[in-house]
Amino acid sequence: MHIENSVYSSMQTPYTQPYMAPTANMQRKEIGDQAIWTLSSAKTGNGVDQLRDDNMNTFWQSDGTQPHYLTIQFLKKMRVQEIAIYLDFKQDESYTPNKLSIRTGTNIQDMKEVQFIELKEPYGWYVIALKTKLLNDRPYVSTINVQIVVLQNQHSGKDTHIRQVKIFGPRENQNQGLSFPDFKTPELTQYASIR
């Protein structure tokens, strides 16, 4: 598959490493439950369920030749802000990814690489920020498909282990773009109840 040059970019550092598991907050929400998750291959008992169970002791284990693909497909175009991946070189050794490609697109045929990451003996959470480098420089990518591609493992390992993946979108303001009046002013509170 040919991947076109990236039209997206991330901040200076392609990822951050938080001390704790990333969670939803006032700026972001976890949107992984709104998607269909597929894997290029998986050993029995080490598939999508283990990848999404919030248990650091379980993992996806591929079962085939590289590259290994994790595809996240939404039913409609979504805003994707960050992808968080938990890796553990101490336990997984040569099964741990070394080179990752994050790709997005409206279908599998038009995927574009938005981020390339090379990790040396990774341990813990890696939060990869995605944003467009277009005219308005949005802090997210609008896409239907997100693909995490394991291009190479540590020490040239064949199969891969990824312990957890979370995907976040920006939290939208409920009244964004609408100018509702402030119903707490004295002029309007007199109409708050029916007499």
Image (cartoon, rainbow, N blue to C red):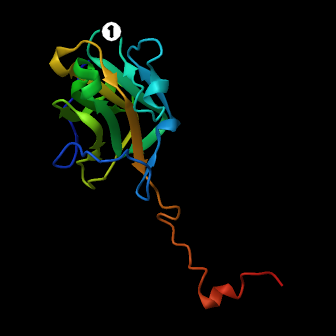
- Of residue 68 and residue 137, the one placed in the foreground of this image is 68
Q: In the picture, residue 106 is in which quadrant?
A: top left
Q: Position of residue 43 (x, y in %)?
A: 41, 12
In this picture, residue 156 sits left or right of residue 167: left
Which of 106 and 155 lies nearest the eye of the viewer?
Answer: 155
x 51%, y 67%: residue: 178
Q: Residue at x 20, y 49 (%)?
A: 11
10 Å crowding of disc 1: few (<14), some (14-19), many (20+): some
> Where's residue 144, x and y in %?
42, 35
Say left or right for 85 vs 118.
right
* Viewer-proximal residue among 83 and 173: 83
From this view, report whether residue 14 is shown above or below residue 180.
above
- Above or below for 182 versus 157: below
Q: Which residue is mark 1?
A: 64
What residue is at 29 percent from the left and 30 percent from the top?
Answer: 88
Q: Quadrant of the N terminus?
A: top left
Q: 90 or 63: which is nearer to us?
A: 90
Residue situated furthest top in the rendering = 64
Query: Identity of the amino acid at label 1?
Result: Gly
Q: Is residue 175 left or right of residue 67?
A: right
Residue lying farthest to the bottom in this orientation:
186
Question: Element under label 1?
Answer: loop
